[in-house]
Amino acid sequence: MLSAQSLALIDREVAKYPADQKRSAVMGALRIALEERRSTGETPEARCLNQEVIEFVANYLEIPPVAAYEVATFYNMYDMKPVGKYKITVCTNLPCALSGGVNAAEYISGKLGIAIGETSTDGMYTLLEGECMGACGDAPVLLVNNHSMCSFMTPEAIDKKLAELK
Amino acid sequence: MAVFVNGVIFDGVDTAAADAWRLDAYVARGGYQALRKILDSKLPQEDVIAEVKNSGLRGRGGAGFPTGLKWSFMPRSFPGDKYVVCNTDEGEPGTFKDRDILRFNPHALIEGMIIAGYAMGTKAGYNYIHGEVFAEYQRFEEALEEARKAGFLGQHILGTDFSFELYAHHGYGAYICGEETALLESLEGKKGQPRFKPPFPASFGLYGKPTTINNTESFASVPFIIRDGAQKFLEAGKPNNGGTKLFSVSGHVNRPGNYEIPLGTPFSTLLEMAGGMRDGKKLKAVIPGGSSAPILPAEIMMSCTMDYDSISKAGSMLGSGAVIVMNEDVCMIKALERLAYFYHEESCGQCTPCREGTGWLYRVIHRIANGEGRPGDLELLDSVGNNMAGRTICALADAAVFPVRSFTKHFRHEFEYAIEHGKTLVDHKWC
Ligand SMILES: Cc1cc2nc3c(=O)[nH]c(=O)nc-3n(C[C@H](O)[C@H](O)[C@H](O)COP(=O)(O)O)c2cc1C
Ligand code: SF4
Ligand code: FES
């Protein structure tokens, strides 16, 4: 179900915790599973976590599937719903809003022609609003696919970024 | 942007240099000397803890609890497993200092945690890193690898019989995991739901073992304290407020960024360092310690110095040191609405007063902001708040109530006007 490379990465996570505490690796393992699906999935449905992969991770870590499922649904960054090839999460919390966070989200929404929370019909982009990313000094900030933080996203910087995300 | 004026953690760190974070650069700045000093002289654990106590270091994560005292609660001679855990789950809106520590000086944190491990007799530690900062998580893992290779971390550190392992754990988007017991649950691979206290982590922490949790900046201050002495650290600040502190300045200033300055520095000086007000606008209000701290109007703020005691006397909290600056164009109802939404969204839902109360607060503030406020809404906010604060498992409920109380206290006329006229008094502009 997951590639050998992903399994090796999960093993590295497992090794961080005491031998009888494999469960601690579930957050890392779900992240790695999601990354594999994101990078190989051809459709929004194929890019998010689903029951099958969550169960696979649970079995791999020898924990009950419901334990892994609870974690996948509790933390915001795990995609449990179909998601575009590029998920763009803009921070609109107060500190960012004071330096253009809300304006950035509106600008992207206008450019992509999708509302916040939506995925474009071609399955390319999902636009979300996020909470504080711990980077308020670099506002406006946004995350592309959870792991790539982009700072100082003025309209010009957004234009440039969107041109890269093809 | 990172701007460091002087201070303890960023002393000599050239943030513009690509390799400033690497082990070599850290050692060249005097890094790992504190650890060597302890191991070479076989400094007793009590002496390390006494030094941290004498430095006046207070926890930089929000509550300001004396770090040395916290360390002394650990059962040092308890023979079983014990842990030190670092809280880099920085998610308190306005706070972005711990990210810069991982980015520019991760070895200060690593050395601080190793020393903590030594002082409390623990063999292992974890650093819990905020989900949204993946690049910093990766860098921290690389720094750990450097420290292991150089013999500062792992088995038989620097050839002695002291061993300590340290790992990074990556969060995945839940503000509540910054609360220390939620963080422990999360480290155990569970939903991040805070635990009842007592028992406290010092007796029942990670995997049920004695555990000490400190903020990134707290740990990262320790190498300086051991190397240069408690007295020097204490003198960098003021009595009962030892050391320098990182302030994350955001909002309507010309140069947002982190400023490491002596505790006790006047707010007006910090504002000047941050380039003053953007576009020459007037200062209206400041949240001085992260979104959970009560807001203070400009006049009060301008008379404060930046330290635990002064800010607390003014009716707020120094908290995490996140200074959110707002100008005259901000409608206080709109600003509060954004924060109320955040707390509602991030409540973990296990206590009814918090789960339901944060929703009520948000909905009432939302309707006032939209000109649909009703007579009695301010009293309603009060009564909802009174039913939340102090009645829940963790302090998130209080954190949600503080902003509501302080905004409606200091800017009451704006709320009254909006309820009466069906529109806000201030023609709101975010920026
Ligand atoms: C809702 C909530 C969120 C918190 N978030 C953080 C955080 O992001 N970082 C942090 O260091 N402490 C946070 N804290 C405080 C921690 O519970 C804990 O007091 C702190 O990590 C202890 O470290 P210190 O003594 O070095 O400050 C939070 C507390 C609460 C109630
Ligand atoms: S106060 Fe709120 S966040 Fe804290 S434990 Fe209760 S429901 Fe969860
Ligand atoms: S408020 Fe946007 S990163 Fe902190």
Image (spheres, rainbow, N blue to C red):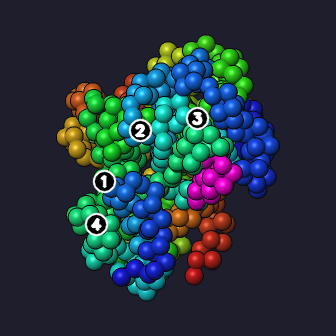
Amino acid type of the residue that numbered disc 2 sits on in the rendered structure: Lys
Q: CA distance from mark 1 to mark 2?
A: 20 Å
Image quarter of residue B395:
top left
Front-most of residues B269 and B20: B20
Q: Secondary structure at mark 4?
A: loop
> Which residue is found at the position 25% from the left and 60% from the top?
A67
Q: Which mark is residue B190?
A: 1
Name of the residue lying farthest toward the top: B239
Please name the residue that numbered disc 4 is placed on: A62
Looking at the rendered image, the disc whose residue lies closer to the viewer, 1 or 2, is: 2
> Which residue is found at the position 62% from the left and 40% from the top?
B160
Please name the residue that numbered disc 2 is placed on: B82
Front-most of residues B417 and B23: B23
Amino acid type of the residue that numbered disc 3 sits on in the rendered structure: Ile
In the picture, measured across the screen, residue B267 lies left or right of residue A123, that is right
Amino acid type of the residue that numbered disc 1 sits on in the rendered structure: Lys
Amino acid type of the residue that numbered disc 4 sits on in the rendered structure: Glu
Marks 1 and 2 share the same chain: yes
Q: Which residues are magenta?
A: B138-153
Disc 4 is attached to a residue of which chain?
A
Q: Secondary structure at mark 2?
A: loop
Q: CA distance from mark 2 to mark 4?
A: 25 Å
Please name the residue that numbered disc 3 is placed on: B115
Q: Is residue B280 magenta?
A: no
Disc 3 is attached to a residue of which chain?
B
Figure check: B135 above or below B78: below
Disc 1 is attached to a residue of which chain?
B
Image quarter of residue A76:
bottom left
Marks 4 and 1 share the same chain: no
Disc 2 is attached to a residue of which chain?
B
Is tag 3's residue or tag 1's residue first in the polypeptide sequence? Answer: 3
User: How many labels, in total?
Assistant: 4
